[in-house]
Structure formats: C-alpha cells, structure tokens
Amino acid sequence: GKREIIRRSISTNVLEFTRLISDLAEVLEQHTGKRVLCVLDGLDHVDAGPAFELLNGHFQTLTLPKISKVFIVPLTLLNTPFLATIGGRYSTVPNIKVFRDPRSKELDDAGFGFFKNVVSRYVSLELFSEEALASLCRLSAGILRDMIDNTSAACAAAVDADSPRVTEEHVEPVWHRVMRFYMNQLRSQDYEVLQQVEENPQLEQGTDGVPPLLHNKAIVFYPNGRGWFGTHPAVRRMMAEPAERH
C-alpha cells in the first residue's frame, strides 16, 4: 500500500513526493534528534533512459528536502550526463565477489563467508546443508537482494516438503525459477553478447549490447580488484544445459 502510494507520487508529481520526504524526515528528526539519511532505492531496477529523464529533469526539486541523500541508480546511468549532476551522491550496490576468478566455479572464501553471515541474521545455518548454502551463494551472483530472496524461496520449498533441513533438492527449484525468468527475457541476439562476455570478462575490446543485459542482471559486474563482468550463474547454466530440462 505505502509503496504504491509513493510510486504514484514520484511518477505523477515529484513535488508531492518531496513533500512526503520532508514530512517524514521532520517526524523522524523530532523523535530521534538526528538528521535523516534518505536512500532513494529501487532506481537500479529502472531502465537507464527513464531513470535519467526522471532524475535529471527533477534533480533540483529532489534536493529541496534538507536531508542527506544517496541515490541507488542503474550502473548504465553513470554513462549519461547525469553523473555530472548527481556528483558523488550515488551507489550502485556492487555485487559481492562469489567466485575466485571470472571463469572459476569455485566460491571465493570471503564472499561465501559474507553470504553465510547475511543468512545467519535471519535463520540458523544449522538448518542448511553446506551444499545447499554453496548452491544458493552461486545462484545469488553476489546480489544482496537475491541472496535473501532465493534463500527464502529454498526455505519455503523445504517447509512444503516437510523437511527438517534445506538441501540441494530444495534449492534446485529456485535455480529453475531463475532460469525460466531469463528464458523469457533473453532474445536470440543476446546470446552472442553473453558468449562474448564469457570469453572476454574484462571487456577490454568493448562489447555492444551489454547495458540492457547488465540492467536485467543477465550480466553481472564483480568490482573486486580490477573487476570483471560475467554472465549470471543461472544464465551460464541455462546456456550449457538442454532447454527442456528447465
């Protein structure tokens, strides 16, 4: 309910949206005695074009509330003139490193540890087999939201099966759900781009067609050290296995 109201406000009347922010910030400041940091999240799920039009056209209005702000924006938006407008007040919520290197299937110890720490805040790790946790970590592609969402889905599958533990058997349907999502999203020409990314993770020579695939997370960016691009693990598996298995 509240999310829908806010979405309607920002899509139809940015001034009304800023008023909502100001009123909420004032109430919070009165109760806590501290200034408020406003994180404008969810914009990373908006395509770069509409996000640029919204933010660039209304940025001065959005800065009216006297609060600190961070904008969570799509990575591709930083390749537009909006970068000069927004300055340093943005975050792209970088992916966690889950693999040791671009072509490895071995989990990075630090990344796997981060994943388990996230899960342990919601449910005991003793309820998972180590294999199930490793599979869920791979499937997340280091995306924090997906770490939580996919693990929750696997837990639900275990509950439905009346199982005392979450095993790989309960993780498999979650993999298939994500693969079906990409089967419905990807076009025939996208697979050529995905194969180029597999062969050239650093994209030294440049690869056309990356931005929209980066937006729908078929391609993910791991900003570790020099950083590299990679196909989403579910997409990689989907490309390697017969379609009828999904």
Image (cartoon, helix red, strand yellow):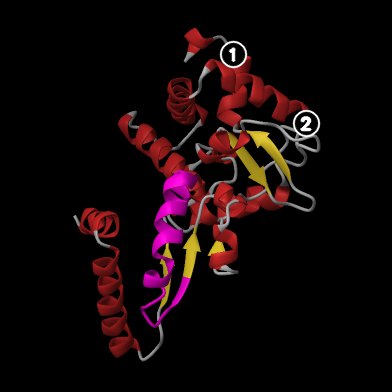
Q: x and y percent of residue 2 in the render?
A: 21, 59
- Residue 8, image quadrant: bottom left
Horizontal arrangement in the rendering, residue 56 relative to residue 213 (left or right):
left
Q: Is residue 218 above or below residue 91?
A: above
Q: Which mark is residue 200?
A: 2
How many discs mark residues in the rendered view? 2
Would you name the residue on which mark 1 appears? 241
Q: Nearer the viewer, mark 1 or mark 2?
A: 2
> Which kind of residue does numbered mark 1 sit on?
Glu
Name the residue rendered at 39%, 56% in the picture. 54
Name the residue rendered at 42%, 47% in the picture. 50
Q: x and y percent of residue 226 in the render?
A: 79, 50
> Which kind of residue does numbered mark 2 sit on?
Asn
Q: Are marks 1 and 2 in contact (CB under 8 Å)?
A: no
**Is the residue marked by circle 2 packed among few (<14), some (14-19), or many (20+) residues within 10 Å?**
some
**Is the residue marked by circle 1 packed among few (<14), some (14-19), or many (20+) residues within 10 Å?**
few
Q: CA distance from mark 1 to mark 2?
A: 21 Å
Q: Which residues are magenta?
A: 44-69
Name the foreground residue: 74 vs 28. Answer: 74
Q: x and y percent of residue 1 in the render?
A: 19, 55
Q: Is residue 59 above or below residue 221?
A: below
Name the foreground residue: 192 vs 236. Answer: 192
Find numbered disc 1 in the image and state the secondary structure of the residue it sits on. Answer: loop
Residue 7 visible within the image? yes
Q: x and y percent of residue 217 in the render?
A: 54, 37
Disc with the residue nearer the chain's start (1 vs 2): 2
Horizontal arrangement in the rendering, residue 30 relative to residue 127 (left or right):
left
Q: Is residue 65 magenta?
A: yes
Name the residue rendered at 20%, 57% in the picture. 5
Q: Is residue 193 magenta?
A: no
- Residue 142, image quadrant: top right
